[in-house]
Image (tube, coloured by chain):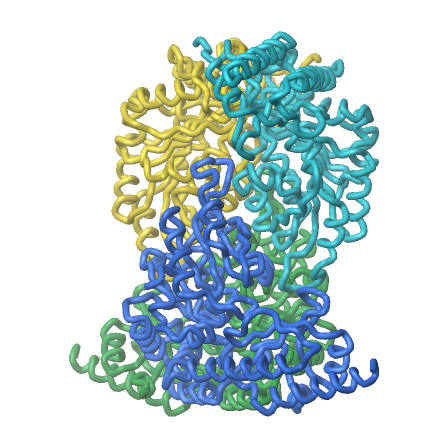
Chain colours: A yellow, B cyan, C green, D blue
Amino acid sequence: MENKLQTAINFASDNVAGVSPAILEAIAACNAGAATPYGGDEYTARVERQFCELFERDVSVFLVPTGTAANSLCLSVMSPPWGTIFCHPGSHINNDECGAPEFYTNGAKLIAIDGPAAKIDAEKLASASKLKRGDVHATQPHAVSITQATEIGSVYTLEEISTISKVCKESSMRLHMDGARFANALVSLDCTPAEMTWKAGVDALSFGATKNGVLGAEAIILFDQNLAAEMGYRRKRAGHLFSKMRFLSAQMDAYLQDELWLKNAQHANTMAQRLANGLRQISCIELIGNTQSNIIFCRLPKTMTTALLSEGYVFLHDRWEAGVARFVTSFSSTAAEVDQLLASMTCIHTQQKKEFA
Amino acid sequence: MENKLQTAINFASDNVAGVSPAILEAIAACNAGAATPYGGDEYTARVERQFCELFERDVSVFLVPTGTAANSLCLSVMSPPWGTIFCHPGSHINNDECGAPEFYTNGAKLIAIDGPAAKIDAEKLASASKLKRGDVHATQPHAVSITQATEIGSVYTLEEISTISKVCKESSMRLHMDGARFANALVSLDCTPAEMTWKAGVDALSFGATKNGVLGAEAIILFDQNLAAEMGYRRKRAGHLFSKMRFLSAQMDAYLQDELWLKNAQHANTMAQRLANGLRQISCIELIGNTQSNIIFCRLPKTMTTALLSEGYVFLHDRWEAGVARFVTSFSSTAAEVDQLLASMTCIHTQQKKEFA
Amino acid sequence: MENKLQTAINFASDNVAGVSPAILEAIAACNAGAATPYGGDEYTARVERQFCELFERDVSVFLVPTGTAANSLCLSVMSPPWGTIFCHPGSHINNDECGAPEFYTNGAKLIAIDGPAAKIDAEKLASASKLKRGDVHATQPHAVSITQATEIGSVYTLEEISTISKVCKESSMRLHMDGARFANALVSLDCTPAEMTWKAGVDALSFGATKNGVLGAEAIILFDQNLAAEMGYRRKRAGHLFSKMRFLSAQMDAYLQDELWLKNAQHANTMAQRLANGLRQISCIELIGNTQSNIIFCRLPKTMTTALLSEGYVFLHDRWEAGVARFVTSFSSTAAEVDQLLASMTCIHTQQKKEFA
Amino acid sequence: MENKLQTAINFASDNVAGVSPAILEAIAACNAGAATPYGGDEYTARVERQFCELFERDVSVFLVPTGTAANSLCLSVMSPPWGTIFCHPGSHINNDECGAPEFYTNGAKLIAIDGPAAKIDAEKLASASKLKRGDVHATQPHAVSITQATEIGSVYTLEEISTISKVCKESSMRLHMDGARFANALVSLDCTPAEMTWKAGVDALSFGATKNGVLGAEAIILFDQNLAAEMGYRRKRAGHLFSKMRFLSAQMDAYLQDELWLKNAQHANTMAQRLANGLRQISCIELIGNTQSNIIFCRLPKTMTTALLSEGYVFLHDRWEAGVARFVTSFSSTAAEVDQLLASMTCIHTQQKKEFA
């Protein structure tokens, strides 16, 4: 079957990309022979060891196929049904999962704490977490979820994570990190996985991989081992325990091997920087925020948007705010694609200036 | 990584098998270029058309990665939280999903209706479905779930399905078919998919593929289109909507192409028949039930079980009843493996007879 | 047992009051003999008829003991688990029920729509209800809940209710009214129960009674009969179906007889007006908002608050905002109590002025 | 309103009875003045002390209006959503609560363990509780619920409770007692409340009162204080926290005062014995089981049932089994009523014998 979209240049999301060749090879390679189902295989054991090494400590690992599953399962062991889960108003768990956290937690309440650059303001969080403690009429603070990198591509500094973690500890809340773009944030900060997580106070992590070159595999990483006991039951009960688990594990195994995950993320981030640098040269386009990972938000003239779409470029626009467009790069974005987009933009800009002159 | 189990002969389950080569090729083939995420791609559209053709009518199709997800999501649109779902006591939804149906339905009640050969007795079902109708103190009959082929490998005849469906209609219940081994049942009955489902009164089907050579993909098939409206939300909310959906769809596409699914199932069934025929020749082994699909239950002398295990054969035993063993064949089982097992059994039998003589 | 609080003047809430004598008499009067349990009794039948007359049409009536139960059960038949329920940020369902709506709806999402005087802004509601319709990644608008009278004592006009109802109809949402203080709003508007509910587009009503002189009984009134079919199961399943239902019904019966409910509410509102009028005369106190029912918010000097508390007055303060106090009158508040409070305030004010002079 | 049923002799259930006069007096007596809502009042504090004295130790007490609420809330703190709760097939939680335990536990699985006289067989329980421990595919044993007195009026001996409790402890399960007819069982065994509960290993008790002369109040008694922390939130979230709590507490207070609860239960049991003794004299009636509390099951000739109904007697029949009738006595049953029923039966029996002679 031919893929019409194949020829279009697509910056709609990092999930429009395919899969890194090494991942596909790993899937094929693990196919030989029989394997114990449900995670009793060697690949899964190896992935568990890899994560322990990666995070420089014992961690509990549970593979699942989607980020929504990873986030919701994490939250379900961090908050009882009468718990409050604090998150940013723009967070994926709040906006884009059709109430999955509420489903998995059996009705916990997400309360949005605003803050600049899609990051939770720690002071506001501290205030909110102190309200109505012990009052049976109110849901009780149990968890905080931060997204790293955020939904707009910004990145929490290690200090910012630690500050939020301190607020959590003061109020006996647990800290979850939605790491759908964990690798993009990590290479942006140039720190270790340990530093960006448990050393900064994170209790549970959705370790994303799918957006960064994997077919469909994410890892729930629990640093607080107390949370692990019930996770196996919750995962099975949600239908997220694969019988042929080796094929999830082989994906993650290949993703972690030879720093593929870091290379993919570094490439995506570099492409985003390349695009940002180019956009700064086009006077009718206004970049929004810094470009810290692989997502760029900018303001485009309506005529520019229309022209780009008619040329076949794929990207999201006018979804968050009129006139605002989003471009996302991925491991598979090429410099040629970025340059072609920039060339088209420059050309459109020049032509439109002439028309209005 | 070498796979130790690779060399062992494994009849533990059809989920210990790997993936059909054509499926792996399809996954690789669909990787080129970008694709609209979440099922907006061409592969998904094609799979939907294929299922309409296969079932000779319009159907709603929702791909999910696991059978537990397929079953639970089906049941969640067939029963309200205060509903009763009738199933066989030995059914997967009742025993092996850690309460997933209860989770997805928000607390519906599974009530077991017994019957020979792991099949629901229609008369008992009819009696049970008439109790306490309209009584607010009791959960109300809303759905019946049958497994085809059953957990012990038996197969409902078309007439048996129709009889149960008639009971359903008389009591305004909907009928679900857990088709984790749908293909094995279909080739056993030698009928059409339409005949085994909606023509016999089935409203919703978990169309299994994973156990029959697919990596991890199952299709929810809704014949009752009224059930479809909410399924998209339920699937997303459960974390079962894949962003890179084309890779699920490509698996299912390849599975349905060139009757791979039927060939795989036919092979597995044939291997089971070959094994059954051999077992009948060994006097110390007692076959249980007929061999209608790819599962064989039999009674083995304890010494036989021990000897087989020590020779490295992998199979489940003493789990359902002391002395009872289960052998499951799959698309990847070979005649040589079956024959080797039979040879070992015969040899052990002969040797043990001598010892006791 | 003597009741120490008996002698204190208590404006903390209308739920600190006891029960109207006629209600107690009705409870005692219905005690004679046996009665069919679970609502099969004559008192319950009579209450159902009374509500049909009161609302000038057929309605479905379900008695429950608490307002939280009434609200949550109403919402549970108006929104699926993946539904959005719009409400004011200050609403009881959002703040004071420990997530009961989320529990009863199995995880629906409450989204707050702001507006002045604790009333939802219809335009903001209209905008919010149009977002992401049909997008499986987002919970879908299904219901709107307004509180009449609101949590701060303000009252939606009939026109305001109709405007919100129109927004609901345009977006296929249902409209719920939390009428914990229904009677207080009704006498304030001086309209009929029909006008304030279904004639203005309300689909389901929590008809409050407990705060207005009843021991513990609220009525779920369903104008949309489609919502009624499942309510009986939901109520039982939640443990809110009384076996000795006649004692709930007798309370409601007496509440509705001889306009006791309207008289009680009129009295409470009149006492609030009396208090408001007095507060306006004390220069250091600032009334907040109009006094439309039986709740008054005002700003008190800290010294005034301290002095009143030390004199034994009971009222809530510094809970919503520093310096803000709330006074709630009820059917049992007396003019003498109001006057005594005002006299104390005046005295404290005068004395403090002297001290600062 | 006159009560037509008043004149009929009603043995349908103990919940058709009204309320003990002392309970009504207590409700009226506590009405004076204001009281802190939601259980902050003196009556509630006193009831808590009373229960500590009654059970000779510290207990946590949570009042709720119905038995279904008490049972479900107890179970919700004893079992996670993936837990198994063992109960007798004939138990109220399994049959008569429309899935309330499943709702409150968010989907735990009730597994029925049979046994004679409506009592769980401890050996079968022990076997069942050992299956699939730690297997993520199966719900895990967490709680056992026994009913004392049972739904057919039988009573567990202290030894039987201890034996079940021992099984619980061996499998780390908690033990719940549904004491809807706690008092009837207690006077039957002639032991202390402590002996029948925590001394025998009970962790949580639904202390019934409504069926024994109270209007609508039950107490959740937690002996395992670890279970108490979350109960307040769960009760509120379920809408079972009364604002005017004093009126629940006053009922329970009066119920416990002067041994009213024991006197009421003793009377009901005595009336049942009187009825049983009489039934034994009528040759066409066959008593089923011993009469240990206030419930009698017996076999009646169809003609007898018809004749009694036509004379206006109210009782349940042909509900459990054709030809089986149930008679339930209560605190308000009188010796005259029992004797009148027996006289009618004797008369019908004599007449019918003549007709057939």
Task: From the top left corner, tell me how far across and down residue C117 is, in percent.
Answer: 48, 65
Task: From the top left corner, tell me how far across and down residue C271 is, in percent.
Answer: 45, 85
**Left or right: D234 with respect to B115?**
left
Quadrant in the picture for residue D74: bottom left
**Left or right: A283 with respect to A159?**
right
Quadrant in the picture for residue A239: top right
| Residue in view at x 65 percent, y 65 percent | C202
| Residue in view at x 33 percent, y 57 percent | A131
Q: Is residue B9 above or below residue A301?
A: above
| Residue in view at x 58 percent, y 79 percent | D276
Q: Is residue C241 above or below residue B345?
A: below
Quadrant in the picture for residue D252: bottom left
Q: Nearer the viewer, residue B244 or C339?
A: B244
Q: Nearer the viewer, residue D219 or A194?
A: D219
**Left or right: A347 with respect to C19?**
right
Task: From the top left corner, tell me how far across and down residue D23 is, in percent.
Answer: 45, 85
